[in-house]
């Protein structure tokens, strides 16, 4: 009799473990590299936990935009999402430090800074309520438009899109005296098609994956800001997984994001050439125009600190790291 009861308890406990499902939503379309790699990670996770932990994906925006996904996470309908960093700024504002406009000049600078700041950002997200498994480069975002843009004055005349859930970008754009049009990422393509907007800032791989490139004609050939993406799982939901399986989850998805980080850089380089082949014209701003862009951009950190969108400590850390790198490499600061 005791053996029968013990067997029943084991079956019950095994069934409970198998029932843990992490539902993830994203705007990334099915067939994209992001979905391909995350599905591979999910299969490995299920295999190594004997199906105690499963991931179910809702790609292509079927669960709505990032605001809708966050709302569904809050009520427990979803447990996580794959987001661009700005969508999560309310949970850890300093995560947006990489998105300061015209701060980085090269991928070498990005790599130097990220090696020293990524962990701080990941830890900050966890304190804010989300478990993050790594940072995947979105890449340098460029100003792309239906009309040629050379200068800040040109930009001010355009219908400029910004993400509707990114308060940091909204505040930053004010330094350029630009009145933007906030839209969800899911609505951008339609906005371009209807001329509601005519200017976007996005990495090349984003323009291709989301089909925005079919509506644009020009690209301002100067890296404007740096974008990254994350897989964020609600910390409370994650804690319901056993400690051992949490470690397996972190290891597997950590490797997935290391791979995505590397592949996205390679794909962005290819995407630049793909945009050229599509007939998009690359416009290099003149030294005088670029000087004005940089002057306005230099006002952004103080503006964001005053608006409580970034901490002074994080801004100082970034500036010191860039000075350190440039001094070591013999690169003159602007």
Image (tube, grey):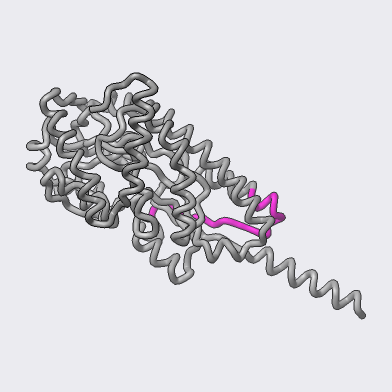
Name the quadrant containing residue 243.
Answer: bottom right
Would residue 148 be seen by someone viewing this image from the given angle? no
Picture coordinates of residue 218, whole percent (x, y): 19, 31
125 relative to 48 in the view: left or right: left
Of the pair 222 and 75, the residue shown nearer to us: 222
Residue at screen point 35% across, 46% down? 314
Of the pair 299 and 224, the residue shown nearer to us: 299
Would residue 34 be seen by someone viewing this image from the given angle? yes
Is residue 283 shown above or below 37? above
Residue placed furthest toward the top: 330
Task: Please state the extent of the stretch shown in magenta in the rendering.
Answer: 45-61
Picture coordinates of residue 59, whole percent (x, y): 44, 52
Quadrant the N terminus occupies: bottom right
Of the pair 294 and 192, the residue shown nearer to us: 294
Residue at screen point 18% across, 24% down? 284
Is residue 209 shown above or below 191? above
Quadrant the C terminus occupies: top left
Picture coordinates of residue 76, whole percent (x, y): 48, 69
Name the quadrant containing residue 153.
Answer: top left
Residue at screen point 78% across, 70% down? 11
Residue 195 falls within the magenta-colored stretch: no
Picture coordinates of residue 321, whole percent (x, y): 38, 34
Residue at screen point 46% across, 42% down? 118
Residue placed furthest toward the bottom: 1
88 relative to 287 in the view: left or right: right
126 relative to 316 in the view: left or right: right
């Amino acid at each position: 009799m005791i053996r029968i009861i013990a067997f029943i308890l084991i079956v019950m406990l095994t069934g409970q473990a198998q029932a843990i499902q992490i539902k993830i939503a994203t705007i990334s379309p099915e067939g994209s590299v992001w979905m391909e790699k995350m599905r591979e990670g999910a299969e490995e996770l299920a295999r190594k936990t004997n199906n105690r932990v499963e991931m179910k994906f809702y790609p292509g925006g079927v669960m709505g935009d990032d605001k809708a996904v966050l709302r569904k996470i809050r009520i427990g309908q979803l447990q996580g999402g794959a987001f661009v960093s700005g969508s999560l700024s309310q949970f850890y504002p300093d995560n947006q430090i990489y998105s300061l406009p015209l701060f980085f000049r090269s991928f070498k600078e990005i790599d130097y800074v990220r090696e020293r700041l990524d962990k701080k950002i990941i830890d900050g997200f966890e304190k804010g309520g989300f478990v993050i498994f790594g940072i995947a480069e979105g890449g340098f975002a460029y100003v792309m438009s239906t009309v040629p843009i050379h200068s800040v004055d040109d930009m001010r005349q355009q219908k400029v899109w910004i993400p509707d859930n990114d308060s940091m970008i909204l505040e930053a754009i004010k330094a350029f005296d630009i009145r933007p049009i906030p839209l969800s990422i899911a609505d951008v393509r339609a906005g371009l098609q209807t001329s509601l907007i005519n200017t976007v800032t996005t990495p090349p791989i984003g323009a291709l994956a989301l089909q925005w490139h079919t509506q644009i004609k020009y690209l301002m050939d100067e890296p404007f800001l740096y974008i990254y993406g994350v897989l964020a799982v609600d910390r409370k939901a994650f804690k319901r997984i056993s400690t051992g399986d949490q470690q397996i989850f972190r290891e597997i998805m950590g490797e997935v994001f290391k791979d995505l980080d590397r592949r996205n850089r390679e794909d962005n380089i290819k995407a630049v050439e793909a945009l050229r082949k599509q007939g998009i014209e690359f416009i290099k701003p003149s030294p005088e125009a670029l000087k004005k862009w940089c002057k306005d951009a230099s006002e952004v950190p103080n503006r964001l600190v005053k608006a409580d969108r970034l901490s002074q400590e994080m801004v100082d850390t970034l500036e010191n790291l860039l000075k350190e790198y440039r001094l070591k490499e013999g690169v003159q600061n602007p």
